[in-house]
Structure formats: C-alpha cells, structure tokens
C-alpha cells in the first residue's frame, strides 16, 4: 500500500571522492544499480532502511483492514477486501525480497519490526472505527501511496524499482474499490453520508502526513534526490495528492476538514492549512492509538506460526534424507 | 529454532510460446511449498500459466567486477553486425 517519506535515514558515507564521483556519474546517466554492483555504504544503508520500512508498512497495513473483513456488508465487498489485504501481504513480500538483495536477512528485518526498532508508516497506528474507513483508506491512503510509489518505479536501485512496478499495477484496484465504497455511502442515507464524512475527517490529516515532514525539515532528502532513490520532494508529492483529491471529494459532496484549503490561481494548486507535526512525530515514535496493538498482533502471528515454520523445515529435511537413502 | 528458510528464485511463463522470465524471489522450506507460495505471491492476476522455482543458492552468476572484460569486447567487433557491410541500393533489401 504504502511508503512514507523515509524516517530517520543515516546516509553518511566514507568512500573516496573518486569512488563517489564515479558512482554519481552512473546515477546521472540513469543507469540502474544492481545488488552486486559497487555502491556507497550510505546508499546501501538508506535503501535497506527505506525498503524495509516500506515492507513493514505493507505487512502492518494488513491489520487495520483485516479488522473489517468478517463484517463487510456484502459478499462483493468481502471478496474485494480479502483480495486487497492479500495484495498488501504480497507487496510486503516483494519488498522484503528487494531489501534482501542488499545483504540484510528476512529474519533480521522481522526481528527489527517485532522489537519496535524498525519504523513503519504512521498511518497504520490509527484505528479503523467504521466500515466507511475501508473506503477512505483505499481512496486516501492508497491514493497517497500511489503518488509516492509511481516515481519509485524509476528509483535508481533495480530490484526496488522492479518491485514497485508490480505494486503500482495492483494499487489502482485498491484506490478504486475504496472510492466506490465512499461513493456508495455518500450517495446513501443521511446517516451513511455522515459516516463517510466522519471517516474523511479522521483520515485526511494523517494521509497528508504520509508524505513526511516539510522539505525544509527533511534533512536527508537532498542526498536521496541526488542518488535518485527519490524523484520528488515530500512537499511536491503532497501537493500533487491534494490537487488530485479535492475534486474527488467535491464530486462526492464531502467536505475536506481544512478551513484554510483554497485554490491558488497563481501556483495552479490548492493551499492548505498547517499540519500538526507534533502529532506526526508522536505517532511515528509509537504513541499512536493503535501502535501497541499492531506490534502485539504481528508478534502473535509470528509466535503462533513458529510450529508451522519448524514443521515445514523438518518435513523438508525428512524428505531430503529419504531421497538420499533411496539413491 | 533458528534455521533459516531457504530462498528461491521464481520464473513465470506468461503464455505458451514465451520463455519463463524471472519475476522475483521468496522463502520456502522445500520445492512444494515454494511452488505454492509462488502461485499465491506472483500469479494473482493471470500473470502466467507455468512456474519454475530454483534454489537461489544453485545459481552461479558472472562477477560484476568483470563486466568490462566479459562484455565490452563485443562493442569493438562491429563486423559482427549486418550494418557493417555496404550493399548497393540497387540490390534491394537484404
């Protein structure tokens, strides 16, 4: 579903100026970097962290929606939601594989998520209180993710770019099914419309925060741009998202919960009100309403699945031994 | 248990007549599980009709540090390409 402006990267690097210049020349020529190519340590570390955060976000992102699968209002909605949550799981797996090409193991990444050391998108630390949230998440959260992820298809690191191409193809279904849910509610009874509005009110600001801090406060952005890991700044992507989303809300007859939101003719885009960055940092640091539950749920899934992993490996070992004995 | 689950590379044939193409990788305890996981992870939308899974450890790759010596000599053997040879227009397409 989802990638956030990278949280807390460390892109210091200690190679010689000649090495860095040679690497930059390849980047500037739009050459893709593949796992076994030489690369600055800072480039490798930034990618491991970013792809890891992205993968964790996909996996944790299954939880808020999984919450509503058994209560979907119709079989059609249930089948679509199941398929969407399965996609998120798949996206997590493509991304973990991309990160693993850089020499970090799946076990290490899982451990970092479960211990709380690794970050994931702050948006998933908010609760899904009503069915309308399934629509709003698809529309806004997946919509914001698409804005972020389309430029990542051209990321300079080959495996990440390839994974993102697959992910982007699948995201479009997520956003459209979400918008259809919100549209059905917005065109329904007054109570249903109020449900859709309440949901938009709760998810709008967290969705804008998904793009990460303002450019002026995003200290690692410049290096990521130079290395072409990132193609647009946080604020540029946020602006694109707002400009695309406001007319969609107008069509539904819903109100964006920002009294300062207005069209700016000169820049050809919308101006928006101030974002509550204190809330953002609180949630990123694990004080979101659902942060503890999310990690608890992942830990339970990991622990409860331990016997399955052990049995599968034991079974593979037994078959291998039998095959050798038969030869 | 601290044993790690092996890594597999996944290849899919989009349809008959085309070659299997590398699509990604996954972890699985054995080839049976790897095939099942590959089906779930890489073919949710009609991406193909045949899957190969290969243990990643079984792949031998060329060394990126030797890319130049391995592949650059082809660039100066231009006589290997058809456009190196001049054929008069009157002869027609060849």
Image: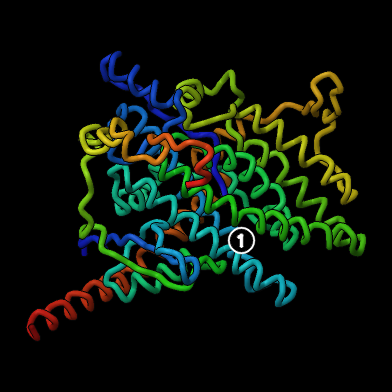
Q: Which residue appears at 51% of the width and 53% of the height?
A: A58
Q: How is the image coloured?
A: rainbow
Locate the C terminus of chain A by quadrant. Answer: bottom left
Q: Give x and y (percent) for residue A30.
A: 46, 29
Q: Give x and y (percent) for residue A162.
A: 47, 47
Q: Give x and y (percent) for residue A79.
A: 65, 73
Which of the two residues, B11 or A303, is positioned nearer the viewer here? Answer: B11
Extreme residue toward the bottom, this view: A326
Q: Is residue A73 left or right of residue A212?
A: right
Extreme residue toward the top, this view: A17
Q: Which residue appears at 65% of the width and 43% of the height?
A: A144
Tell me if residue A106 comes above or below residue A85 in the rendering: above
Which of the two residues, A185 or A22, is positioned nearer the viewer here? Answer: A22
Which chain does the residue under circle 1 lie in? Answer: A
Q: Which residue appears at 70% of the width and 77% of the height?
A: A75
- Count of labels in the image: 1
Q: Describe the element under mark 1 as helix, strand or loop.
A: helix
Q: Is residue A52 visible?
A: no
Which of the two residues, A22 or A101, is positioned nearer the viewer here? Answer: A22
Tell me if residue A177 comes above or below residue B80 in the rendering: below
Q: Is residue A38 left or right of residue A296?
A: left
Tell me if residue B7 comes above or below residue A251 in the rendering: below
Tell me if residue A273 comes above or below residue A71 in the rendering: above
The 10 Å Cα crowd at callout 1, few under 14, some 14 to 19, many 20 or more, is: many
| Corner quadrant of residue A174 | bottom right
| Corner quadrant of residue A176 | bottom right
Q: Is residue A165 visible?
A: yes
Q: Is residue A169 left or right of residue B5?
A: right
The residue tagged 1 is A65
């Amino acid at each position: 579903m989802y990638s956030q402006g990278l949280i807390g990267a460390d892109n210091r690097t200690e190679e010689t100026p000649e090495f860095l210049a040679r690497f930059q020349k390849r980047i500037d020529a739009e050459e893709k970097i593949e796992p076994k190519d030489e690369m600055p340590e800072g480039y490798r570390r930034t990618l491991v962290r970013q792809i890891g955060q992205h993968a964790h976000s996909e996996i944790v992102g299954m939880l808020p929606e999984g919450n509503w699968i058994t209560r979907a209002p119709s079989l059609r909605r249930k089948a679509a939601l199941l398929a969407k949550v399965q996609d998120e799981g798949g996206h997590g797996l493509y991304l973990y594989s991309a990160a693993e090409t850089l020499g970090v193991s799946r076990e290490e990444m899982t451990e970092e998520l479960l211990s709380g050391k690794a970050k994931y998108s702050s948006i998933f630390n908010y609760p899904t209180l009503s069915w309308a949230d399934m629509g709003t998440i698809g529309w806004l959260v997946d919509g914001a993710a698409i804005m972020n992820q389309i430029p990542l298809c051209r990321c300079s690191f080959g495996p990440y770019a390839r994974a993102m191409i697959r992910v982007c193809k699948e995201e479009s279904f997520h956003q459209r099914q979400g918008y259809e849910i919100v549209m059905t509610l917005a065109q329904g009874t007054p109570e249903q419309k109020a449900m859709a509005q309440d949901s938009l009110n709760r998810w709008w600001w967290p969705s804008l925060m998904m793009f990460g801090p303002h450019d002026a406060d995003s200290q690692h952005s410049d290096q990521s741009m130079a290395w072409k890991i990132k193609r647009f700044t946080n604020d540029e992507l946020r602006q694109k998202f707002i400009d695309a989303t406001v007319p969609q809300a107008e069509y539904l007859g819903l109100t964006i919960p920002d009294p300062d939101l207005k069209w700016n003719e000169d820049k050809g885009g919308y101006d928006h009100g101030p974002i509550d960055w204190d809330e953002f940092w609180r949630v990123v640091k694990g004080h979101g309403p659902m942060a503890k539950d999310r990690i608890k749920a992942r830990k339970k899934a990991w622990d409860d699945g331990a016997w399955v992993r052990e049995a599968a490996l034991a079974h593979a070992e037994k078959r291998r031994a039998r095959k050798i004995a038969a030869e | 248990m601290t044993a790690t689950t092996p890594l597999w590379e996944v290849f899919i044939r989009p349809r008959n007549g085309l070659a299997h193409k590398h699509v990604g990788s996954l972890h699985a305890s054995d080839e049976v599980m790897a095939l099942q996981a590959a089906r779930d992870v890489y073919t949710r939308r009609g991406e193909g009709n045949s899957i190969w899974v290969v243990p990643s450890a079984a792949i031998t790759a060329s060394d990126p540090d030797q890319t130049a010596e391995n592949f650059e000599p082809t660039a100066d053997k231009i006589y290997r390409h058809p456009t190196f040879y001049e054929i008069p227009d009157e002869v027609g397409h060849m």
